Amino acid sequence: MKRAALLAAVLACLVGAWSASAATSPLAPGPPSLTEDVATAALLTYPKVARWLDRYPPKPQTDATFDREKRTWTVNVWSGEAGEIATGTVADADGHVVEAWTGPQVAWKMARGRPGAFGGKLLTSWPVWLGLSAIFLLGLVDLRRPLSMRTLDLLVLLSFGVSLAFFNRGDVFESAALAVPPLVYLAVRTAWIGFRATARRGSTAVVWPVWALAVATLFLVGFRVGLNVDNGRSVIDVGYAGVIGADRILDGRVPYGTMPVTDDLKPCGRANSDGEIRERIQANGRCESSNPRGDTYGPVAYLAYVPAVLVFGWSGRWDELPAAHATSIEFDLLALAGLALVGARLGGARLAALLAFGWAAFPFTTYALMSNTNDAIAPAILVWGFWLASSPAARGATTALASWTKFASLIVVPLWLTYPSGLRRAPSLRFVAAFVGATALAFSILLLEPSLREALRTFWDRTVAFQFDRDSPFSIWDWGQYHARGIPNLASAQTVVQVCTIVLAGVAAVVPRKKGPLELAALTASLLLAFELSLTHWFYLYLPWVLPFVLLALFLPREPHPDEAASM
């Protein structure tokens, strides 16, 4: 009996201990410590949130939900037409604000200033970024004339880094505003060079010998490629979209309307740090990571990834994506090689080394490479087209391929059509025939759909229509969506800039009537810069689109190299 009583007492103690533990364990969480009103007040009085709410009428609409597992409150704030204007997380234990997001940061995670989200933490660290900037400046500046226009031009190119610093802190309004002055300056400067080539000396004088520039370029190429390969999981959604699109083409489907989505589909992976499950069983029966808006680019942006996907394949997941890395590296090197060929043709070995160095040293080409985007494809194609600019067919084909990668390249088509001596029947026909042929080849992937008409409609809806209708805080034009006091609505000014860009494209096609390589490069740069300036959604990854032609505008001699004077 004593043993039975002792055993019963031990069991009772164990049961009691287990019951007490279960009452406080995550399996049986208790009620919240804070009330909804207290959690809401904690967020509303948080300095960052309070400063933003001062721009709106008092007493905004609020809502707070409690997460029993994380023991946190999620508070959302709305105000009339502006919609959701703030959100944040409050710790239930002591009421401190874990995170708080306002304005653009509510809907755009990329606006929250997450270190290394683009380009990687190493590249965007101050020592590396300033080091690359210094190399770029010292390699291209004329140290014998440090106060020349060239020095100012190079400093303006590097000044986008100031804007980027604010973006990396999550200060989106400041970063977008700071990007405007260099875009305007460079657009005007290159237009002035294009319309009046005599306004620039066109000297390629540098203090460094050719071999030094070549060695520096090789070092930079090795550094950049090594950095890309070493950072395996650095592919952003743009590069991921290219891999998906190429995979769809190889499977006999078009990329448009077939991107992986999450809508009410069966999960097949784990939740990420934000609690979102991206891996879902798609209509094709495969587990794939979602990228629902990955089909906003032209068909060439997906065809360019086909060779790498054939070699490296795709797991269906947003993993290291070696095909995206390979494609980014490929077109980065093609752009550099194209610039070297252009330089050798128009200015000899010195200009070839200088242009290749400029591409390799500019921090934002490395920024795009480290993000593994598709933003080097269009400029690489245009640079090779510039190298073959004496051929109307080459100009027509390359402008078409570049345009059906990034639609921005369409703005230079009239200029390239009329180069070098205006509209002449035979050259214009060859240009148009090549443009149409390359366009037909690019859009032939739409024939993979049973209905060409339906495929064209889907293409339009997913690309052009989406680009026209999208909202974005990353330029100064769309801030009116926030309806915030002190934040200007510049939509009308954007319309003026867009009209001026179209007018500039028309004028550049006919003035000056006879153009050389310098005029073609400078006006191409000006048109692309004006186009970027007019965009609702602008980002630093777009700077490689214009860099080759800005460099050509700044360093090409006024007259082509004697060996090429006749052919250009």
Image (tube, rainbow, N blue to C red):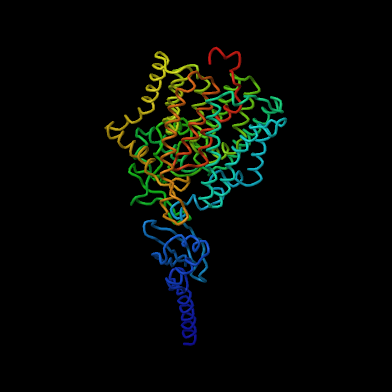
Residue 303 visible in image: no
Between residue 398 and residue 15, name the one nearer to us.
398
Q: Position of residue 188 (x, y in %)?
A: 53, 33
Between residue 211 and residue 503, name the one nearer to us.
503
Q: Is residue 388 above or below residue 116?
A: above
* Residue under the image location 61 percent in, 31 percent down: 358
Residue 161 visible in image: yes
Q: Is residue 473 left or right of residue 344?
A: left
Q: Is residue 428 above or below residue 220?
A: above
Q: Position of residue 500 (x, y in %)?
A: 44, 34
Q: Is residue 415 above or below residue 95?
A: above
Q: Quadrant of residue 80?
A: bottom left
Between residue 310 and residue 567, name the one nearer to us.
567
Q: Quadrant of residue 227?
A: top right
Q: Position of residue 387 (x, y in %)?
A: 53, 21
* Residue under the image location 48 percent in, 42 percent down: 538
* Residue under the image location 64 percent in, 27 percent down: 354
Q: How many marks?
A: 0
Q: Position of residue 504 (x, y in %)?
A: 45, 30
